[in-house]
Amino acid sequence: MSWIDEEFAKREKAEEERKKRQTDAVARQQAVSDIVLPAWQRLVTAIRADVERFNKHSIKKLWTRVTDDSLQVQWDGEIDFLLELELDAPKSRIVYSAPARPPQEWKTHTGSLSVRAKDGGPALFTGATPGAADQALSYEAASELILRPILFR
């Protein structure tokens, strides 16, 4: 094989590898969309349902603000949020945090849930990384994990 043939063979191989990486990236992105986004939507639905139930019993009302990748919970009439959730789709996780209030009144509440496939569908896990002593949670249990320390402190 001449050096010209070798050079074109190298370029052809490099192009095939680039196309494979691109195809793999598209497949990973599709997997994220198929697993992470439905999990996010189901968790948002569970949290909003719990907020509605809370509001039925409480004098002080909560409201939620939802975007494609975040959810905020606030007391009615207050500017600051009580809780914020953010979808980190590339890392397949949902991060939640509550701001620190004056130390005598509040304890910071933060954490994350990982999103992975389980039994053919999306599932939430308490560990942020696979295999890190995590357990699967229902969406209702995840909502309780996130909301209980804030609503009933």
Image: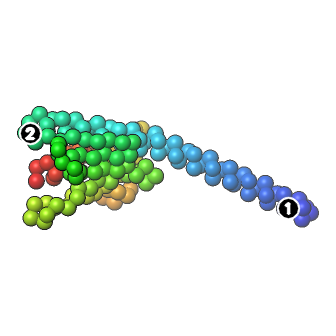
Mark 1 sits on what residue? 6
- The residue lying at 16 percent from left, 52 percent from top is 149
Colour setup of the view: rainbow
The reply to whether discs 1 and 2 touch (Cβ–Cβ < 8 Å) is no
> Which mark is drawn over residue 58?
2
In this rendered view, identify the residue nearer to me: 14 or 121. Answer: 14
Q: Residue at x 34, y 60 (%)?
A: 132
Residue 27 vs residue 62, the one in the foreground: 62
Is residue 7 something that shows in the picture? yes
Residue 139 marker: none
Amino acid type shown at disc 1: Glu
Q: How many marks?
A: 2
Amino acid at circle 2: Ser
Q: Secondary structure at mark 2?
A: loop
Residue 109 position by quadrant: bottom left
> Which tag, 1 or 2, sits closer to the chain's start?
1
Crowdedness of circle 1 by 10 Å Cα count: few (<14), some, many (20+)?
Answer: few
Q: Nearer the viewer, mark 1 or mark 2?
A: 2
Residue at mark 1 to residue at mark 2: CA–CA distance: 75 Å
Please state if 17 lies on the left or on the right of 42 as rendered.
Answer: right
- Crowdedness of circle 2 by 10 Å Cα count: few (<14), some, many (20+)? few
Quadrant of the image occupied by residue 127: bottom left
Secondary structure of residue under mark 1: helix
The residue furthest right is 2
Q: Residue 125: in sight, yes or no?
A: no
Query: x, y percentage for residue 80?
Result: 22, 52
The quadrant the N terminus occupies is: bottom right
Residue 53 in the image: state x and y as whole percent.
Answer: 15, 35
Q: Is residue 90 left or right of residue 143?
A: right
Q: Look at 82% across and 57% down and name the residue there.
A: 9
In screen coordinates, is 66 left or right of 106?
Answer: right
Q: Position of residue 37 (x, y in %)?
A: 41, 41
